[in-house]
Image: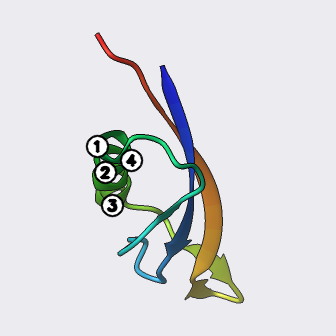
Amino acid sequence: MFNDTFIIPESRAGVTSWALPLSFAAHAVVAAALDAVRQWIYEPMIVNGRPRGVVFAVTVRFALK
């Protein structure tokens, strides 16, 4: 099992163009996790009726089968 935490900036449109891994795990596993994270679509945070970009951390868990 592999866990890695990523810092992800979310745009006002609810998508992310990059993510920063917080560990030094095997490159192939981190690359796969980054590919997955980049496909996610978020509902933007709304402040005073307007969408705002935010930065958050998410942990991605992988298991080999």
Check disc 2 and report the residue beneath it: 31
Q: Is residue 3 left or right of residue 47?
A: left
Task: Looking at the image, tell me whether mark 4 or mark 3 is earlier in sequence order.
Answer: 4
Residue kind at label 1, given as amino acid type: Ala
Residue 58 rendering spot, x and y as whole percentages: 59, 50
Q: Which residue position holds label 3?
A: 38
Q: What element does badge 4 sit on?
A: helix
Q: CA distance from mark 1 to mark 2?
A: 5 Å
Q: Residue at x 40, y 19 (%)?
A: 63
Going 64% across and 64% down the picture, which residue do you hit? 56
Q: Residue at 38%, 47% (x, y): give it.
A: 30
Q: How far is the residue under mark 3 from the one under mark 2?
A: 11 Å
Q: Which residue is mark 1?
A: 28
Q: Quadrant of the C terminus?
A: top left
Asked whether disc 4 touches disc 2, contact meaning CB atoms under 8 Å apart, the reply is yes
Q: Quadrant of residue 49?
A: bottom right
Q: Amino acid at mark 2?
A: Ala
